[in-house]
Amino acid sequence: MDRRTSLTNKGLNCIKNNSLEGEDIETSLNNSGNYSIIKSNNLSTENIEDGSYLEGYTSVVSTRMKRLEKIFENLTNRKESLKNEINVLKTNITKVAEKMHSKIDQDCSDLLEKTDTYYKNEEQKLDKLQSQLMESMKAAEEFNNFVQQVKQSCSVEEQNEQQSEIKSRQQQLDSVKHDVAFGSIKFFSNNDVLGNIIGKVKINDTDTSDPYADQPKEIGLIEGNQMVAGVTMLNERIYIIRELLPNVEVYMAADLSRYKMLKLEGLRKPSDITGDVISGHVYISDAVGSIYKLQPDENVLTKLPVDVSGEPQGIFVLPAEAANAGNLLVTCYDSRQLKEFTPAGQLVKSIRFQQDVLSPWHVVPSLRAGWLGGGDGLVVKKYALCHGWEGGKQHRVCLIDDSGRNLKTHGASNGSGAAKLDVPSRMAVDPYGYIFVADRNNDRIVLLSPNLVYVRDIISRSYGARQPRRVHLDSLNGKLYVGLVDGSVRIFQLSDYQNGT
């Protein structure tokens, strides 16, 4: 009777009584779940009753059980394998984390050490500067005392005899004031800092001798992929802008390591950059018609309220010695003008260039020829202007007065050699009025005397500085920064500053 329990009573009775065959059996047993067994094994009524069909069914179940056991075994092995992989991953993560913590600690330690060294060096420089300023003040006081003594104790004839000495001392005093303002202190002793760097410099404007006795030596390279649009150095940091990029790259001058990258919203087509040693600000010209003032430490960028719609190009900050110290000179390319603004953006004056001055790139004060005595400082009355573009008729550096009139020129149509230039794009000027010209298509930096006489190619084509677009002079350390079309900035030592030769 036990063998029949798998079938419904109705289905079994139908089979025993032979009352159902074929489709009737299928219909009767369908709901019991046993018809599939009967049909698949071709079972008849007799072998259902004697239970022989169970042997085949048991074999199928056994086979499936073995498969399930094998699957379970594989899953168990996979579980163990995953556990091992997880343990290895945990170990690796722990090691990486330990290395990262170690690297961060080391980087922080190195940064703190560099920062400490930097501030110690700055303190030493400040102490030295204060000492030198005291020396210059003492020299000024001695000179004033000398003048008073002459006036009080000498007759008119004797004063006339002393006039040459008075004039000589006045020139020395003016030189001290000038060099203090430019960060290149000069004194009357054998410790003449700038004199040791560039050699003897005469006073008169017609001097054409070469003040830089040594051949420049390349001492550094900052690489880049985008054309250099400007380079300057301020407070031991190098600032670089690139064509069509709204960024300012900042490097430490001591070791050329990347300090930070500033992304400046609103800057579209940077064309030049310069620093103001008085305020510590950096100015950036944007050729679309804007001038920006950057506070580097706070990363604050301010757009000055100035009218420079004529495509501003080269810019220059008047130094501390000038009566308008801190004012910004902006060269406007399309409108062919020089505009002077206060740090707040107020227009001081505008100078329109002559009709034959096309494609003006940069204007700098002509220091030797252009400083005239003023009440509270020295007044700029003359400027050096470079202009010329591809296909243009004139490629020149011009000496102009404050009405825009050309007083003297160097160059003519584009060409090479001592007398010609080919796209002179930017300039730098040293405290003695010598001018460094980035002569782009001639692959050189030309040195001109204060009265625009060719001295030499101070960075010649043999240095491999192809197509220089920008040039900046660090007169304190005797270094020349040259920005190239290929995106690199090459740094040259004009003389051995450390050894004073």
Image (tube, helix red, strand yellow):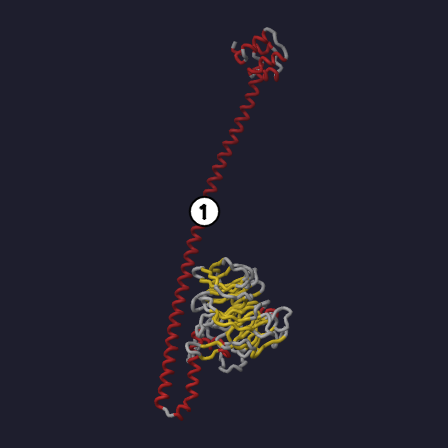
Q: Residue at x 37, y 74 (%)?
A: 131
The residue most toward the top is: 17
Q: Is residue 249 visible?
A: yes
Q: Nearer the viewer, residue 330 or 117?
A: 330
Residue 295 pos. (x, y %): 44, 62
From the viewer's perspective, is residue 219 above or below residue 65? below
Residue under circle 1? 95
x, y percentage for residue 133?
A: 39, 75
Q: Position of residue 345 (x, y in %)?
A: 47, 66
- Give the total number of marks visible in the rendering: 1
- Compared to 226, does 395 lie above or below? below
Label 1 residue SS: helix
Three-letter code, disc 1: Lys
270 lies above or below 34: below
Residue at screen point 38% across, 72% down = 130
Residue 446, horizontal then vertical, whole percent = 57, 73
Image quadrant of residue 268? bottom right
In this rendering, does residue 191 appear at all? no
Relative depth, front residue between 310 and 284? 310
| Mark 1: few/some/many CA within 10 Å (<14, 14-19, 20+) | few
Residue 39 sits in which quadrant? top right
